[in-house]
Each structure stands twice: as C-alpha cells, then as structure tokens.
Amino acid sequence: MRQDNWEHFEHDADIGLRAIAATREGLFEVMGQALTAIITEPATVRPVETVSVSCEAPDDALLLVDWLNALIFEMATRRMLFGSWHVELSGQKLQGQVKGEVVDRLRHQPVVEVKGATYTALSVEQDSEGFWRGQCVVDV
C-alpha cells in the first residue's frame, strides 16, 4: 500500500512505516495516517470523537515512537480507529488531537492489530531540501 507521502515496507514479520512531509508536525500526522492504514482504509473512519494525546521525549525519533504508541494505546483501550490527526510541537513536546470512531467491523474490515511501535529502523531527519522524513517498524 502506498500513498503520495507515506508507504508501508516489509520487515520480517512486522510492518514498516515510512513518510515524508514539509513540516515536522506534518510528518507526525502522516505517520499517524500510515499507522491507521495498516488496519483499515483511513478514509473510511469518520471524525465522530476527538481524543487528545500528549507526549514528550528527548529527540524526534523517540518522540515518534511515543506518538505512535500513544495512538496504539488509545485505539486499543477505546476500541477506536482514527482518520484525522493534528499535531503541535514545542521543542520535544507533542500535543495532538485525533478524531475517529469506534471500530465497525463490517465497515472498517480491520486487517491486523498493531501491538506497538519499535525502535527498529527508527529515524526522523530533515533532508537537504527541508523535507522531514521518518520511519519506524511496528509489531503486528
């Protein structure tokens, strides 16, 4: 599965997420979309309920893992999927608002359950053209 600004890549029994965005905030938002796309088509998720997510980490790569794991936690405990992501960053603090709905197995047809984001193949960097690139492998 590939979109214009993110893709999934195979990694042993797990799945990798890779994305590019014009801003650091945008990278985190796109990685959230790529995470949902492992489970279902993000466009099928209606923005019924808003959930706040906050994280803090010493660097961008660890912040990405914390962000993805926070999304995974919220999806699991609320039995929700997210289809809209908004991230604000201040240094290494992330404040996010995600919108979604409770899983509807018939409509969403979830493919897998994501267990957690890992440190495998983890990176976040700004390239020479100013774009933000990130990747992370998630355990499924």
Image: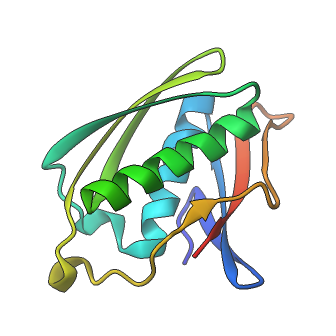
Q: Which residue is drawn at 76% across and 28% down?
A: 59
The N terminus appears in which quarter of the rendering?
A: bottom right
Q: Residue placed farthest to the front in the image?
A: 77
Q: Residue at x 24, y 68 (%)?
A: 44
Residue lying at the far right of the rendered structure: 128
Q: Write the residue at 28% across / 84% down.
A: 109
Residue 102 figure quarter: bottom left
Say if residue 100 shows up in the picture.
Answer: yes
Viewer-proximal residue, 118 or 47?
118
* Quadrant containing the C terminus in the rendered view: bottom right
Q: Can residue 131 be seen in this view?
A: no
Q: In this image, 123 relative to 35: left or right? A: right
Direction from residue 20 to residue 1 in the image, left or right? left
Residue 92 position, x and y percent, is 65, 20
Up the image or down, 117 lies above or below 89; here it is below
Q: How is the image coloured?
A: rainbow
**Relative to 41, is 18 on the left or the right?**
right
Q: In x, y percent, where is residue 48?
A: 13, 49
**Image x and y of residue 40, in percent:** 36, 74
> Height in image: 86 above or below 29?
above
Q: Which residue occupies 45% across, 81% down?
A: 112
Q: Position of residue 38 (x, y in %)?
A: 49, 73
Q: In this view, does 3 lie above or below 72?
A: below
